[in-house]
Image (cartoon, rainbow, N blue to C red):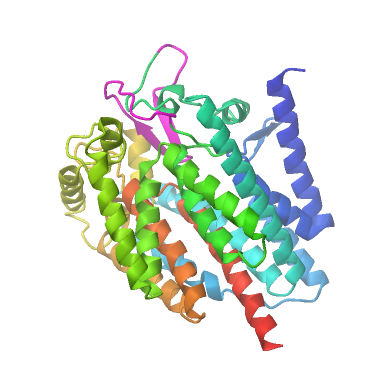
Amino acid sequence: MDLFTIVQLLQSLWVAFIVIMLFYRFRIGVASYLAYIFLVPYMKIDIEGFVLQWNFINILLLIAFLYYRYKKKLLKFDWCPLLPFVIYFGVSLIVMPFQDGLPFSESINTWRVQVMKYLILPFVIWNDIIINHNSLKLYRKVLIGCIVIATLYGLFLTTMPGVNPYVMVVSEVNGEGFNMAYAAGHSGMVDDGTLDDDMIIDEDIVFRNDNPIVEDRLFGRISSVFSHPMMFGLFLGLALLYLYRNKGNISKRLLYVMSLIILTDMLLCGVRSVIVATSVVGLFYLFYLRKFKIFFTFLMIGGALWIITTFSPWLSNYLGSIFDEGSSNVSGSSLEMRLSQLEGCFVEIKDAFLEGKGFGWVGYYLSQNEGHPTILHFESLIFVVICNSGMVGVLLWFVMGTIILKYNNRRIRPIAALLHSLFIFYIAYACITGEYGYMQYFIIFYILMLGEDLYMKRANSI
């Protein structure tokens, strides 16, 4: 039995275990699915011509949850922490008929996929943990286990730049491509007859880059157990904040060791955006807690390190090109280029200024074209929101963010600071890189952090 067959069998058994446990031992099923989401980047299992994918499991999860609650005679559900996201998707659905830049069938399908993928699992987890502390403990152990596995594997991959044995095999099993040139740290693509020219960022988004090959990552671009290095970068930032929220539930040694590993991964994974987003969050956290001396010290150290990078050609290229004019990276590093892209967004929606081109228009456009003449590959959440939903979308994201921050402020200040930081990291990271399904991971971490606060309050009230 070859490796391909073994991995295919193991993946199928894992999914089968999830399905069985959802109806037999519900919490074990949810925990298994939670682990799968973070450790397996794809789900395309062919069973006699029927392809089992995420949506099918999400439907089963919801059915199993309703059945489980019905048996327990617990028919009341809480949507409160998910209300901002429900409003976002609800208003997006209402606006959809007024958008004509995208076929309605494409918009509604994108909306359906995102709602099922982003909201069902967090809804189930939240309504489970609020009635059972053991569920929260189980999901905490699973997520921390995933963090340990993903970060250690990411560190291990620094020994083999451009190669990711696990993702390469899983990608092949699920009919997806693995771009070794991109993973090796080239800012351009290679066509040697064995690699695809396309780099799949998410199921609906395709990146293409015809720039000359430039080696600009010492350890390549590391994706760990995720489909793309940018997903791994997002995970690292969210994981670091989650661990610090749980510093009372894990040993100090584990906290410090894992923090060191995560920070090392951030520096070496080849995703410079995570360094910027983490720095932004660090400054916000210190400022919000009014630790002004540390804040200004951190600011000065950061400034000094930035100056030092100018004396190192490699560091200057690796870090400085985040904003440096003339970067050839497809992610779009130049400030001038970003402003040009922003202007291109308003030109694109000039006939649909209020409502935008359509929900999911950016993903659909990139699937049909190699890139936009001006906006390139829409490498910022800002560009995606403006083009997809116009000024209504900008207002909607502002309202959603405001509701989240107000909801967080109900907590004591240190807890609110961590919850705010989680949201700000997600927004900062997405504004630098784009939005490629990041919301799914953010909501899961957010819900589990809120669960920790819930039981801390209950413990203090006894």
Q: In this view, does 460 lie to the left or right of 357?
A: right
Q: In which quarter of the image is residue 13?
A: top right
Left or right placement of residue 154 versus residue 49 in this view: left
Image quadrant for the N terminus? top right
Q: Which of 250 and 130 is in front in this view?
A: 250
- Compared with 54, 168 (above or below) is above
Estimate the x, y position of residue 183 in percent, counting from the top left: 44, 28
Q: What is the x, y in percent for residue 2?
A: 73, 17
Q: Which residue is at a point 75% across and 59% down the rendered structure image?
A: 64
Residue that lies at the very extreme toward the top in this rendered image: 193
Name which residue lies at 18% across and 42% down: 337
Question: Looking at the image, can residue 396 be seen?
Answer: no
The answer to whether residue 413 of the structure is visible from this angle is yes
Residue nearer the viewer, 360 or 443: 443
- The magenta segment is 192-220
Percent position of residue 138, x then y: 73, 60
Q: Residue at x 48, y 68 (%)?
A: 418
Is 196 a magenta residue? yes
Q: For the stretch drawn in magenta, what is the main secondary structure? A: loop
Please state which of residues 14 and 141 is positioned toward the viewer in this rendering. 141
| Above-or-below relation of 32 to 325 | below
Residue located at (45% from left, 67% from top)? 90
